[in-house]
Image (cartoon, rainbow, N blue to C red):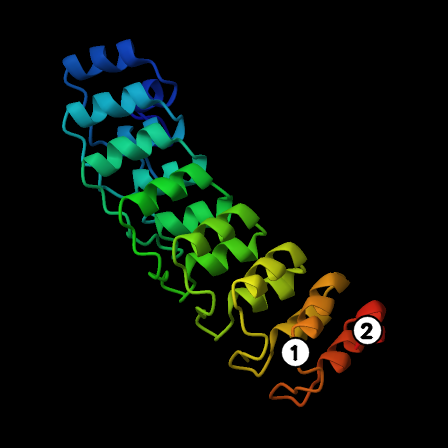
Amino acid sequence: IPDKNGSTPLLEATLHGKVEVVQLLLDKGADIATPDNIGRTALHMATVGSHVGTVALRIEKGANVAIAMNNGSTALHQVAYNGCVGIAKLLIQKGVGTTRVMNFDWTPLNTTAVNGRLEPMDLLLENGVDISVDNNDGLASLLSAASTGNFENVKMLLERGADVSVTGMHGSTALHVAGRVGNSEIAKLLLDRGADVWISEMHGWTALHAAATTWNLETVKLSLENAADAKSKNIWNQTPLFLSILFGRQGAARLL
């Protein structure tokens, strides 16, 4: 009998990794596919708790590895979030879709990029995930990793062939993103891999415009050292210097 949240004894036992209890409930006829109120099945619960044994049992009993929660999240999305490689391997071996997009637009690869999960990212890439696939917002995994400051994930994606000049829906590159969040380490890595400081996004912002709005002077210096145009203007005729003053970034203003 479900509780007010739709959780059943099978879901609770699975969440806490109680393999013997799970086996008993299944032997007694518990429905492996019954979800709670947000669409989590026993397979989702097993991945939430990173319980490899209970995931293997779910699959053995015929669980649908591709079933999604109400938000579009599959078991593989959850593994990409929590980093359990053992479960990821099981799911991929059973043919779970590796490019399924959640309702809020993340693919499993986007999820590893945002959350800094290197091992699941490596596994996805080893199993042929298309590194160029964007989410529904046009955000490539390289931009996702740059936006959250995950240097090692950015490095791995570049080493596996990610396009350093790939753009998001508004035309921003990973260098724009690194500038916007003030991450000079990632900005340097991107520049070393050939990122173009002259590329403008749809509103005319270059990476230098983005860097000028942050407190991180190193990102401004890097752009200037790589021949960025300090006099370039966005569609509102704003230069990087204008933006640095507008945002109160006195150090950046002095550099510019």
Q: Which residue is mark 1?
A: 228
Q: Which mark is residue 103?
A: none
The foreground one among 129 and 5 is: 129
Residue 146's place in the image compared with 71, above or below, is: below
At x 66% / y 76%, what residue is drawn? 209
At x 59% / y 52%, what residue is drawn? 149
Q: Amino acid at mark 2?
A: Leu
Residue 136 relative to residue 23: left or right: right
**Based on the displayed image, in which of its 4 quarters is residue 95 positioned?**
top left
x and y percentages locating residue 132 in the rendered image: 35, 61
The foreground one among 250 and 1 is: 250
Circle 2 crowding by C-alpha within 10 Å: few under 14, some 14–19, many from 20: some
Residue 7's place in the image compared with 124, above or below, is: above
Sequence-wise, the earlier of marks 2 and 1 is 1
Contact, mark 2 vs mark 1 (Cβ under 8 Å): no
x and y percentages locating residue 203 in the rendered image: 56, 82
Residue 167 relative to residue 146: left or right: left
Q: Secondary structure at mark 2?
A: helix
At x 40% / y 26%, what residue is drawn? 49
Q: Which mark is residue 255?
A: 2
x and y percentages locating residue 87 in the rendered image: 32, 30
- Real-space Cα separation, disc 2 to disc 1, in angstroms: 13 Å
**Based on the displayed image, in which of its 4 quarters is residue 93 positioned?**
top left
Residue 28 relative to residue 112: left or right: left
Q: Quadrant of the C terminus?
A: bottom right
At x 69% / y 85%, what residue is drawn? 238
From where the camera sits, is residue 87 visible?
A: yes
Q: Secondary structure at mark 1?
A: loop
Residue 102's place in the image compared with 96, above or below, is: below
Q: Amino acid at mark 1?
A: Ala
**Based on the displayed image, in which of its 4 quarters is residue 51 positioned?**
top left
Q: Quadrant of the N terminus?
A: top left
